[in-house]
Image (cartoon, rainbow, N blue to C red):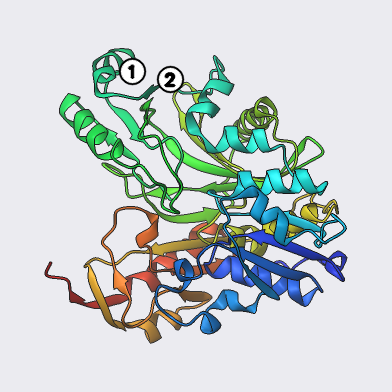
Amino acid sequence: MTTPLADYAQFAGKRIAIVEHMQNHPFVLGLRQAQEHGLEVWLLTGDRSWYTHGHDWDTHPLAIVDRVIDVDTTDLDAVLAVVTGEDGAPLVDGLTSFSDYHTELAARAAQRLGLPGPDPEAVRTANIKDHLRIALGDEPFNIPHVLVGHRGQLDEAARRLGFPMIAKPPAEAISYGVRRVDDMAGLVEAWEELSAVRHSLRGQPRSGDVLLEQYVEGEEVSVETMTVDGHTHVFGVTSKDLFGDPAYIECGHTFPVPLSDEERDELYHVVRTTLEMIGYRHGPCHTEVRRTESGWRIIEANPRTPSSCMTMLVTDVTGRSPILDAWLLTIGVTPPIEPVVHRGGAAVRMIYPTRRGTLSHIDGLEAAAAVENVQVLLHVEKGDHLLQRMDNSSCVGFTYCNGPDRLAAQELADKAAALLDFVVEEDLR
């Protein structure tokens, strides 16, 4: 069962620029829906091949944008130049990004153009994970941390935090590099690997610092929100199903997660307080939180819409699209978010190859697509090189289902995923 999509007639005659783009099905779906309501979309990209992986751009799903502008999307002045007319006025009604690597630049560009957007410093604080920890200070929902800049700091960090702990890059996405370490040998190994990373997955320079956080045990969820004029509206709570140790890679999600009134109030208070403390007053956010014996703990706050089909979960259950609502905010329109009503439930399973190599064919595709209420959403094709599970970038697609409740939907999504087998010509290197 799907809640009908709300009306987005306010897009008619408006134009936005997107600095890079998320490329999985939900974001392409949102793009198509916005265009159907009259929104003109410009895509600013620094490297089309990052999306195409050797295939032709004209056949890529993102090629449906109204205009592609090739520009250095790490250069603020270059981005401003392509969206500004000779008279100095912006050529677009809004400018934004859902890419973790570009949300700060997009916020700075919107600010310079006088367009709606979040405070760039709030976005920066959220994106740089040790800055978020510092901003939250002594709040009970924060997590003790140490930022390590050289090998000689590891002993003191271990003394302060104890084992187990989490090691991660201070600024990355898709769970890249995140792992649990249980002893000194594991800590040294994590440090040696992560400190050698001097560029982000999108090529931006990195310091080689490593963020260490005290490990907190508990169930993890995410809270999907939209902040308007400093008030944070909540769409609901999404489960975050993880493969677990030693890496923390997502394998699926369900929505909405039921909570008692007390649990929900406490969780929403923690999320809203976090966004207030970093000065985030405008835009979507995907905040990851872990429920521990001593209360909720903030894992990350991501100033963008969620990925991995979570926007589809929210849209099918509430009738509001986080992607389209975020774009409304981008052009200065306040979306009528509240009251949020949940109808039914939805689930997604992320699919990872079990073998690395070049994709030959996919067995079970027809059977998986025949499972009741399930959509099979793949983003690989024959000839693509598949990786084994290391981070979310190795995900090859999703099985998605909406139904009478989240657990029924999860059962069907799992059933379809189990039918798929990605047959590869193994890489012997």
Q: Which structural element holds mark 2?
A: loop
Who's the residue at 12% across and 67% down the image?
Answer: 429
Task: Inspect this view and state whether residue 230 appears.
Answer: yes
* In-front residue for pair 110/144: 110
The quarter in which the N terminus is drawn is bottom right
Q: In this view, does 305 lie above or below 428?
A: above
Q: Are marks 2 and 1 in contact (CB under 8 Å)?
A: yes
- Depth check: give the residue in front, 90 or 234: 90
- Assign a secondary structure to mark 1: helix
> Residue at image x 67%, y 70%?
31
- Answer with left or right where residue 412 lies relative to residue 237: left
Is residue 373 shown above or below 244? below
Residue occupying the far bottom of the picture: 366
Mark sitting on residue 169? none
Is 184 left, or right, of 204 in this rendering?
left
Which x, y percent locates residue 410?
46, 62
- Going from N to C along the chain, the mark reached first, 2 or 1, is 2
425 horizontally vs 339: left or right: left
Which numbered dot is residue 144? 2
Identify residue for label 1.
Answer: 161
Q: Give me the residue at 60% from left, 66% from top.
A: 27
Residue 373 higher or lower than 175, as above or below:
below
Q: In the rendered view, does 396 fall on the left or right side of 104?
A: left
